[in-house]
Image: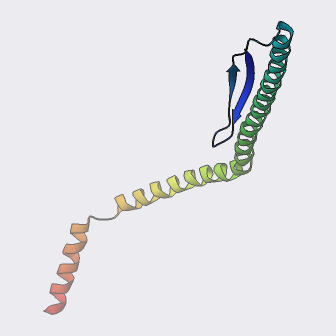
Amino acid sequence: MWILPYCSFGGIPKCDILIVMSDNLTNEEKLDRMLKLTEENNKILRSLHRTQTVSSIFRILYWTLIIASLGGAYYFIKPMITSFAGEGASIKDSLQQLNAIKSQLPDAKVIQQMLNEAQGGAGQ
């Protein structure tokens, strides 16, 4: 029995083990073939592990960069936010002053009556 690696690269790379039956091989030849396959498998596994490690490192760097960017943006925008908060208080004071002035003014109906009387008196 021969165990040979069989790889096809049409589309997605795929490797399978092709087993060829033969009774002509000695135990030592079989052992040599298994050793070669094991070494090839070890290379593939090391490559996968290396790729996974590099991917994890880049993922950590990616998220660290995003979080640091958000922190830096907040640091530079914070003075504007505090100035808007201060302006919000002054706007609130201005609105309270306008409400006080409005409460001192006569109602719109009274003003309309005064205008109607003034127009009626001017026409006579």
Residue ID at (75%, 34%)? 55
Determine the image quadrant of residue 99.
bottom left
22 and 103: which is toward the camera: 22
Scheme of image coloration: rainbow
Q: Position of residue 35 (x, y in %)?
A: 84, 15
Q: Farthest residue to the left: give it.
A: 124
Quadrant position of the C terminus in the picture: bottom left
- Residue farthest toward the bottom in the current orientation of the protein: 124
User: Is residue 8 placed above or below 81 in the rendered structure?
Assistant: above
Q: Residue 27: horizontal and vertical position, in percent?
A: 82, 7
Rendered location of residue 36, percent (x, y): 84, 20
Q: Is residue 117 left or right of residue 90?
A: left
Tally of numbered tags = 0
Q: Position of residue 83 (x, y in %)?
A: 65, 53
Q: Quadrant of the N terminus?
A: top right
Answer with left or right where residue 114 lies relative to residue 20.
left
Relative depth, front residue between 106 and 48: 48
Q: Is residue 62 above or below residue 76?
A: above
User: Which residue occupies the foreground of this view, 97 or 86?
Assistant: 86
- Figure check: 99 above or below 19: below
Residue, x 21% and y 67% (percent of image)?
Answer: 109
